[in-house]
Image: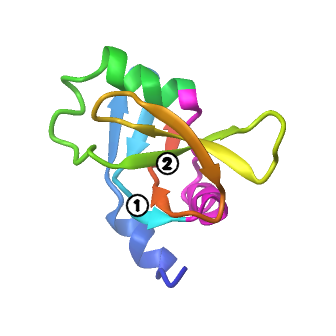
Amino acid sequence: MALNMSNLMKKIKWTKIGKLEWSDNLGEMTWDEGVKICETLNGRLPTRIELIDLVDNHKEEIKDWDYTNAFWSSTQHANTPSIAWYVYLSYGDTSYSTKTNRYYVRAIRKS
């Protein structure tokens, strides 16, 4: 992951939705890279349920986001630690994939 973290931290915009703040789209990366970048930003990957909640209950707040892609969640597959869940924000579809695949990431933190 070739990101200049100090520049990234200065540029990140956070959006308050409910009791959480959501970062800008941080780009496409592996699950492990996503976990690390979220921690660097003093946040975390959202759970699968938190991502689905955006689709179900906050469509108006995210209407300007580019949400047509799949976003990693922090939710890992119960029986296979090398797999985690992702969510398409455009329609709430969920599936799982090996953590080495690349999906988009948004960090969250409590506001």
Q: Is residue 97 left or right of residue 67?
A: right
Q: Between marks 2 and 1, how big is the CA–CA gap? A: 8 Å
**Residue 107: mark in rendering:** 2
What residue is disc 1 on? 26
Q: Is residue 41 left or right of residue 62?
A: right
Q: Is residue 109 part of the magenta span, yes or no?
A: no
Please determine whether, in this image, residue 6 is positioned above or below residue 28.
Answer: below
**Could you tell me the amino acid type at mark 2?**
Ala
The picture quadrant where one finds residue 58 is top left
SS at mark 1 in the image = loop
Residue 111 shows in the view: no
The residue segment tinted magenta is 30-48
The mark that comes first in sequence, 2 or 1, is 1
| Of the pair 2 and 96, the residue shown nearer to us | 96
Kindly identify the residue that appears in the image at 49 percent across and 33 percent down: 94
Provide residue 26's location: percent of width, then percent of height: 40, 60
Q: Residues within 10 Å of mark 1 (few under 14, many from 20)?
A: some
Please determine whether, in this image, residue 42 is positioned above or below residue 17.
Answer: below
Provide residue 40's location: percent of width, then percent of height: 60, 62
**Could you tell me the amino acid type at mark 1?**
Leu
Provide residue 84's location: percent of width, then percent of height: 66, 45
Kindly identify the residue that appears in the image at 31 percent across and 53 percent down: 13
Q: CB atoms at circles 2 and 1 under 8 Å apart?
A: yes
Q: Which part of the image, by quadrant, shows the N terminus? A: bottom right
| Of the pair 1 and 83, the residue shown nearer to us | 83
Q: How many marks?
A: 2
